[in-house]
Image (cartoon, coloured by chain):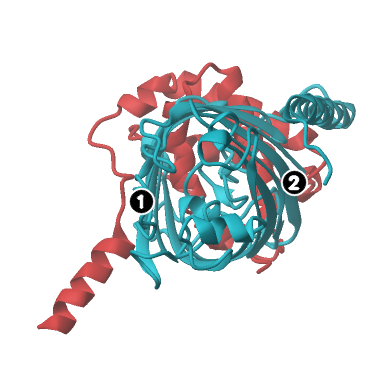
């Protein structure tokens, strides 16, 4: 009995997810499809100019990357999209990424969202979900 | 014995802190291309925390599980801090430095200067008598990551130790304290609910310290370790502004005075990745027999 309770408690603690939105209000706060496309455009422009990480994108198909990011961000914010790209582990495998690079990318995204006038607390709804992906993306431990 | 002149030192320290902030900002600005985020984009939302009254990374009153400085797992960082608390009967200055290594270990040093001002005379100590304390501390992050663990309720958990040494041995003993040196042990649990823009901390501390150790350790009413609690809640209003409140319980070891729990409400402005300033209103209750010791608290932190 005690073991079952402990297992249940562990599942709740470890499986907590505040990331399933009941409606698309966060997506709308990003400006819907148009807004999200613009955020991703600025975001990737920042990344490609960011000396800390731009070299990771030398061989990337940028239009495809932008398309998948819009899909992913749309889905994560409760929008009417399905993400059809690779899972985060597969997509980043072999790059040997460090936390510093992960954080740099997150900064570039935050800057893009600021440029688009997305309120800080709205930004956090997206960033909170992307932050959880660190363990799948960062290989260098 | 050298005379400590608080006003001059305060001004000098403020200028030093201001100079460092300007230098850090200038250095950052030179390395940036126009499209790159400015230095205000921090260790993901400035979760390096503030520096508390004992020099450890955390809130103002509480020690948190976060590791000071900018370093990720792969690097290191650190900061300098200065705090000033103005109470009706006393003033408290704390200055110190902390280093974070590999986002795993934090080492810090703080010096506390508790000026009794005119009140010193009432204790027969002389006007402007000051209690001073050195705190050497270490903290280890045991598990969890406050920023990345957004998909679970798991907090970042750290264990810490503080070696405290008060330089006023005879006076401390005369007040009834057992010792002028002591060690605190604590376990801190910090959770960032990024989706809610909220940071929460709970810390359990085993201590014998009276008023953080400023009035020594142990006393007639308590000779051993007691478990004390400190908690903080902070709301991230914008990238640059956080505000919240804290509460910290204190042991009641001394007979000559009650030791009230401490509380504060604070607002922090993160100037950029390297600097922050905190304005708080702290209520320390009864301190060395004088009730209602509450007042303004100002803290500046410069990181690298």
In the image, which is nearer the foreground, mark 2 or mark 1?
1
Q: Going by the image, does B266 lie left or right of B271?
A: left
Report x, y in % for residue A76: 39, 40
Between A33 and B230, the one nearer to me in the picture: B230
- The number of numbered discs placed on residues in the rendered structure image is 2
Quadrant where the image shows the C terminus of chain A: bottom right
Residue receiving disc 1 = B249
Q: Say above or below: A138 vs B272.
A: below
Colour that chain B carries in the picture: cyan
Which SS class for mark 2? helix
Q: Residues within 10 Å of mark 2 (few under 14, many from 20)?
A: few
Which SS class for mark 1? loop
Q: Going by the image, does B197 lie left or right of B53?
A: left
Between A87 and A125, the one nearer to me in the picture: A125
Residue receiving disc 2 = A57
Q: Residue at x 49, y 26 (%)?
A: A36
Q: Residue at x 56, y 18 (%)?
A: A116
Q: Is residue B152 visible?
A: no
Q: Quadrant of residue B265?
A: top left
Query: Separation of disc 2 and disc 1 at Cα?
Result: 52 Å
Between A41 and B141, the one nearer to me in the picture: B141
Which of the chains bears the disc numbered 1? B
Which of the chains bears the disc numbered 2? A
The chain letter of the red chain reads A
Between B21 and B251, the one nearer to me in the picture: B251
Q: Is residue A122 visible?
A: yes
Instruction: Indicate which disc residue B6 carries.
Output: none
């Amino acid at each position: 009995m005690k073991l079952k309770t402990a297992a249940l408690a562990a599942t709740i603690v470890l499986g907590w997810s505040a990331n399933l939105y009941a409606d698309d209000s966060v997506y709308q706060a990003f400006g819907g499809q148009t807004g999200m496309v613009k955020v991703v455009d600025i975001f990737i422009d920042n990344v490609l100019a960011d000396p800390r990480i731009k070299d990771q994108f030398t061989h990337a198909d940028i239009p495809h990357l932008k398309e998948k990011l819009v899909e992913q961000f749309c889905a994560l914010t409760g929008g009417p999209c399905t993400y059809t790209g690779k899972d985060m582990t597969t997509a980043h495998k072999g790059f040997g990424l460090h936390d510093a690079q992960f954080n740099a990318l997150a900064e570039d995204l935050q800057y893009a969202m600021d440029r688009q006038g997305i309120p800080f607390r709205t930004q956090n709804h997206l960033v909170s979900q992307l932050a959880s992906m660190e363990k799948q993306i960062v290989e260098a431990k | 014995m050298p005379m400590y002149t608080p006003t001059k030192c305060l001004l000098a320290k403020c200028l030093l802190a201001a100079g460092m902030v300007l230098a850090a900002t200038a250095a950052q600005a030179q390395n940036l291309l126009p499209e790159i985020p400015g230095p205000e984009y921090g260790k993901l939302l400035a979760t390096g925390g503030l520096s508390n009254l004992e020099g450890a990374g955390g809130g103002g009153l509480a020690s948190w599980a976060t590791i000071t400085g900018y370093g990720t797992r792969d690097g290191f960082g650190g900061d300098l801090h200065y705090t000033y608390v103005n109470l009706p009967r006393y003033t408290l200055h704390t200055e110190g430095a902390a280093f974070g290594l590999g986002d795993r270990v934090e080492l810090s040093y703080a010096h506390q200067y508790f000026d009794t001002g005119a009140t010193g005379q009432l204790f027969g100590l002389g006007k402007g008598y000051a209690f001073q304390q050195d705190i050497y501390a270490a903290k280890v992050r045991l598990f969890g990551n406050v920023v990345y663990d957004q998909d679970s309720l798991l907090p970042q958990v750290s264990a810490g130790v503080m070696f405290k040494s008060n330089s006023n041995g005879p006076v401390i003993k005369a007040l009834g304290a057992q010792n002028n040196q002591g060690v605190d042990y604590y376990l801190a649990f910090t959770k960032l609910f990024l989706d809610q823009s909220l940071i929460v901390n709970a810390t359990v501390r085993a201590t014998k310290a009276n008023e953080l150790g400023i009035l020594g350790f142990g006393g007639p009413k308590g000779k051993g370790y007691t478990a004390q609690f400190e908690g903080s809640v902070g709301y991230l209003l914008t990238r640059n502004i956080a505000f919240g409140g804290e509460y910290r319980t204190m042991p009641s070891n001394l007979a000559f005075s009650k030791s009230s729990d401490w509380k504060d409400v604070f607002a922090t402005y993160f100037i950029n990745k390297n600097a922050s300033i905190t304005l708080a209103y702290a209520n320390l209750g009864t301190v060395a027999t004088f009730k209602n010791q509450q007042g303004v608290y100002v803290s500046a932190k410069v990181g690298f």
